[in-house]
Image (cartoon, rainbow, N blue to C red):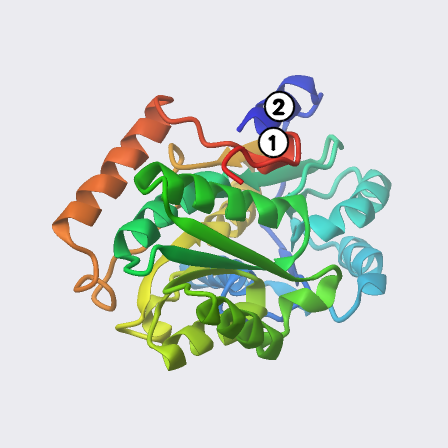
Amino acid sequence: MKLLKTLIATTALVGAATFANAQANPALIFDLGGKFDKSFNEMSYTGAERFREETGIEYREFELQSDAQREQALRRFAQAGNNPVVVAGFSNATAMATVAPDFPDTSFVIIDMVVDAPNVRSVVFAEQEGSYLVGVLAAMASKSGTISFVGGMDIPLISAFECGYAQGAKATNPDITVLATMTGTDGSAWNNPVKGGELTMSQIESGSDVVFAAAGGTGRGVLQAATDAGIFAIGVDANQNYMHPGNMLTSMVKRVDEAVFNAFNDVNNGEFTAGIQVMGLAEDGVGWALDEHNEALITDEMRAAVEAARVAIIAGDILVHDYRTDNTCPVE
């Protein structure tokens, strides 16, 4: 959280004025990986659909197919009078910083990155906190003493998931081994389930019996490979427990749906504010999923341990390192 607090302290956005807009005419841009990736993008869709169902107001949408479309999509929706224009994904920051000043009366929202503009809301998550919790569960569920992580694009954001996961696991079992692999270095890393499966099989061959995927659509291959091999998997962003009941230990949920719903709703109610919004454990922005698909896998001891960790993190008694502060992980 140190990076997020620093950003909040130094940006001029915080405390920006409320935008008194008329009824929302929202637009949503999905990042690479596709709207129905069963993960990050799909959570955006879920939030937009909730708004549509509750208000009856339709929204426009666009699925990015390449990096070259980022600025074009933002500009097109703003020119068409859509408000707010919401985009999910850190890779949209440059395009947002370019387009937002040209449309000062349009409310923009970017998820997973900070853009310093008076009409932009930047929603960032404390992914490392939720990842710490599922790391606790992974360490307690592992019988081999080796667990693993498959990330999507090799960027500090995904390393924050990895580091939090490792920190939670090693706090629970200092002797545990945590293997980690990233899928790639460009946008294709978010939508390569075949490679995700191959990376997972390699980790299983090295002894992993619990794997955490933070890789967008690539994660589908990770979860499938884990299921085929009979080991536990941990989903990400959305509650993915339903995908492979009996093999899904849990999912690290990231409430992107709330960020999208709140943006649409705030504009519709004339309550939109620009600035940075941080969503961590204390704000119920991240967490872990317990439902009918995995409750038989989570013992009372595991529930107690993860709840104790959650309370301690919120209280500040456990400090979960944010890899984005210095690009290091203290437990690796």
Front-lying residue, 291 or 55: 291
Q: Position of residue 272 (x, y in %)?
A: 58, 36
Q: Amino acid at mark 1?
A: Ile
Name the residue rendered at 15%, 46% in the picture.
Answer: 301
Q: Amino acid at mark 2?
A: Ile
Name the residue rendered at 20%, 47% in the picture.
Answer: 303
Q: Position of residue 45 (x, y in %)?
A: 53, 63
Q: Of the two numbered discs 2 and 1 on the same chain, state the one appearing first in sequence.
A: 2
Name the secondary structure under disc 1: strand
Label 2 Cα neighbours within 10 Å, binned few <14 / some 14-19 / many ≥20: some
Q: How far is mark 2 from mark 1, CA to CA?
A: 7 Å
Front-lying residue, 67 or 180: 180
Q: Tell me the residue that label 2 is attached to.
A: 8
Asked if disc 2 and disc 1 are in contact, CB closer than 8 Å, the reply is: yes
Q: Position of residue 282 (x, y in %)?
A: 38, 32
Front-lying residue, 319 or 277: 319
